């Protein structure tokens, strides 16, 4: 105890964000990438691409399941909006996410 840990976040987190069931279900089969891979847009390789493949409720909170080639992520809305990008939305704004 007493050890300090540094926490680094990539995106802008809003802890008040919560999924509605319809909203989470509308994300099924959508492609996402991690924010640090945004330089691959508009056509990211499959090695960095995730697919929203499930919706669940845990502890009165709705979460989405994202399947990546290297594993699965269980995300609340704050995490999804802060550290991930929907590929279809990112490609609608040319040059916005380029580094």
Image: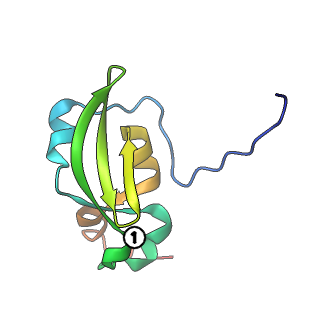
The image quadrant of residue 74 is top left
Q: Residue at x 51, y 47 (%)?
A: 12
- Name the spot of residue 85 as percent of width and height, x first: 36, 59
- Residue farthest right in this picture: 2
Q: Residue at x 51, y 76 (%)?
A: 99
Q: Residue at x 85, y 29 (%)?
A: 2
Question: Quick check: 6 left or right of 1?
Answer: left
For residue 99, above or below residue 2 = below
Q: Which residue is mark 1?
A: 96
Question: Quick check: 31 left or right of 45?
Answer: left
- Residue farthest top in this picture: 60
* Nearer the observer, 55 or 38: 55
- Name the spot of residue 52 as percent of width and height, x first: 24, 53
The image quadrant of residue 26 is top left
Task: Name the image colouring.
Answer: rainbow
- Name the spot of residue 76 as percent of width and height, x first: 38, 38
Number of numbered callouts drawn: 1
Question: Quick check: 59 left or right of 56?
Answer: right
For residue 51, above or below residue 8 = below
Q: Residues within 10 Å of mark 1 (few under 14, many from 20)?
A: few
For residue 63, above or below residue 47 = above
Element under label 1? Answer: loop
The image quadrant of residue 89 is bottom left
* Nearer the observer, 37 or 17: 37
Query: Quick one: quadrant of the N terminus?
Result: top right
């Amino acid at each position: 105890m007493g050890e300090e840990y540094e926490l680094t976040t990539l995106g802008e987190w809003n802890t008040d964000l919560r999924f509605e069931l319809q909203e989470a279900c509308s994300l099924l089969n959508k492609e996402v990438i991690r924010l640090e891979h945004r330089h691959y847009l508009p056509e990211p390789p499959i090695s960095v691409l995730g697919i929203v493949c499930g919706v669940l409720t845990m502890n009165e909170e709705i979460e989405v399941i994202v399947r990546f080639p290297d594993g699965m992520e269980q995300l609340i809305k704050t995490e999804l909006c802060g550290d991930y990008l929907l590929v279809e939305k990112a490609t609608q704004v040319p040059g916005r996410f380029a580094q």
